[in-house]
Image: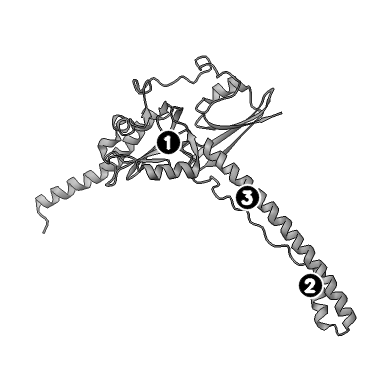
């Protein structure tokens, strides 16, 4: 039989369950408002993968450096130590906080990670099939010998075609591998702030995130005022860098000021992000720039 005490305890627990999810959501929204769009400087080289660097604030040291070294070796360095980069996304999950930089790292849903290129063997021609069937029925030794010679020639032709296809596949795989590696170097990275028993509410404060990453990220000059975001209007945009090339972290309006009106604009999903690609024509060649949320995350340049 339920007592009043039992009923009171059950109602209190039910209320806590109902409140937990909205509190987490509100905290994520607060972290997004506080960090996303801000420039920080990393103190450690960042691997070019969405696996990023795992940080365990309650452990000493807080980073598993052998695993970190393996990720650098396997994926290259996407963000160099000392480089400034934009915080492009904050996500709160059950046991970690994702602190994404410059696009969050290559390898998310929609990114091509396999360098394999498939190719099938050259099929038998109809003539080869017909000869094989006729040879089984042929009793004249002279005709049989002629058929076998023709069959051998057709098979050698097919083997040559297979060899050419394998060579082309090998070249395509190598090119694909290079492209993926280049995209890894341009796709940003992330810190995964992990808590083994789940993210505590106290960790969902900007100050807690800053403290957890203080050893690896410099927030100097970026967190003093949560409302002091960099203006996006062309009148207040900073001057473009010397040399005529954009830099990762620039706003879309800044790149337009630097490179002019794009010739072509397209959009595609990349994981849960919407990536905008703008193609610019300059005196020295074409530049293809990719933006997430109006922020430049990578670009490629081709000279004339």
Cβ–Cβ under 8 Å for marks 2 and 3: no
Q: Residue 133 is drawn in which quadrant? A: bottom right
**Drawn side of residue 17 relative to residue 42, left or right:** left
Task: Identify the mark nearer the N-term, 2 or 1.
Answer: 1
Q: Residue under label 1, please give it.
A: 100
> How far separated are the C-alphas under marks 3 and 1?
30 Å
Judge depth for marks 3 and 1 and give the one in front: 3
Q: Which mark is residue 261?
A: none
> How far separated are the C-alphas under marks 2 and 3?
32 Å
Q: Name, please, the residue furthest toward the top.
A: 235
For the residue labelled by badge 3, is the local secondary structure a helix, a strand or a loop? helix
Question: Residue, x 47% and y 31% (percent of image)?
Answer: 80
Question: Residue, x 83% and y 78% (percent of image)?
Answer: 134
For the residue labelled by badge 2, is the local secondary structure a helix, a strand or a loop? helix
Q: Residue 246 is drawn in which quadrant? A: top right
Judge depth for marks 2 and 3 and give the one in front: 3
Cβ–Cβ under 8 Å for marks 2 and 1: no
Q: Residue under label 3, please give it.
A: 173
Image location (x, y in percent) of residue 222:
38, 23
**Drawn side of residue 187 relative to residue 131, left or right:** left
Image location (x, y in percent) of residue 187:
51, 37
Badge 3: residue crowd in 10 Å (few <14, some 14–19, many ≥20) = some
Q: Name, please, the residue furthest toward the bottom.
A: 139
Q: Which mark is residue 129?
A: 2
Seen from the viewer's position, the closer of residues 231 and 178 is 178
The N terminus sits in image quarter:
bottom left
Image location (x, y in percent) of residue 256:
59, 23
> How far separated are the C-alphas under marks 2 and 1?
58 Å
For the residue labelled by badge 1, is the local secondary structure a helix, a strand or a loop? strand
Seen from the viewer's position, the closer of residues 77 and 95 is 77
42 shown above or below 18: above
The C terminus sits in image quarter:
top right
């Amino acid at each position: 039989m339920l007592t009043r005490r039992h009923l009171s305890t059950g109602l209190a627990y039910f209320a806590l369950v109902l409140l937990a999810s909205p509190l987490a959501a509100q905290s994520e929204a607060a972290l997004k408002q506080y960090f996303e769009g801000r420039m920080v400087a990393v103190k450690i080289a960042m691997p070019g993968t969405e696996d990023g660097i795992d940080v365990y604030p309650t452990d000493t040291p807080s980073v598993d450096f052998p695993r970190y070294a393996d990720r650098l070796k396997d994926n290259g360095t996407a963000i160099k130590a000392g480089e400034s980069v934009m915080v492009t996304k904050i996500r709160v999950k059950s046991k970690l906080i994702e602190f994404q930089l410059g696009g969050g790292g290559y390898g998310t849903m929609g990114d091509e990670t396999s360098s394999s290129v498939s190719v099938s063997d050259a099929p038998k021609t109809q003539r080869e099939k017909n000869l094989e069937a006729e040879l089984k029925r042929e009793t004249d030794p002279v005709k049989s010998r002629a058929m076998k010679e023709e069959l051998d020639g057709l098979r050698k032709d097919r083997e040559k075609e297979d060899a050419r296809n394998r060579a082309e596949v090998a070249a395509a795989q190598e090119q694909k591998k290079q492209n993926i590696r280049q995209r890894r170097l341009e796709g940003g990275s992330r810190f995964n702030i992990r808590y083994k028993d789940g993210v505590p509410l106290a960790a969902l404060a900007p100050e807690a995130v800053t403290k957890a990453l203080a050893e690896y990220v410099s927030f100097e000059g970026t967190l003093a005022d949560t409302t002091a975001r960099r203006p996006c209007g062309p009148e207040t945009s900073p001057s473009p860098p010397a040399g005529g090339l954009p830099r990762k972290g620039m706003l879309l309006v800044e790149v337009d000021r630097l490179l002019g009106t794009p010739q072509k604009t397209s959009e595609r999903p990349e994981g849960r992000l919407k990536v905008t690609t703008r193609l610019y024509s300059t005196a020295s060649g074409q530049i293809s720039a990719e933006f997430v949320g109006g922020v430049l995350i990578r670009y490629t340049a081709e000279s004339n």
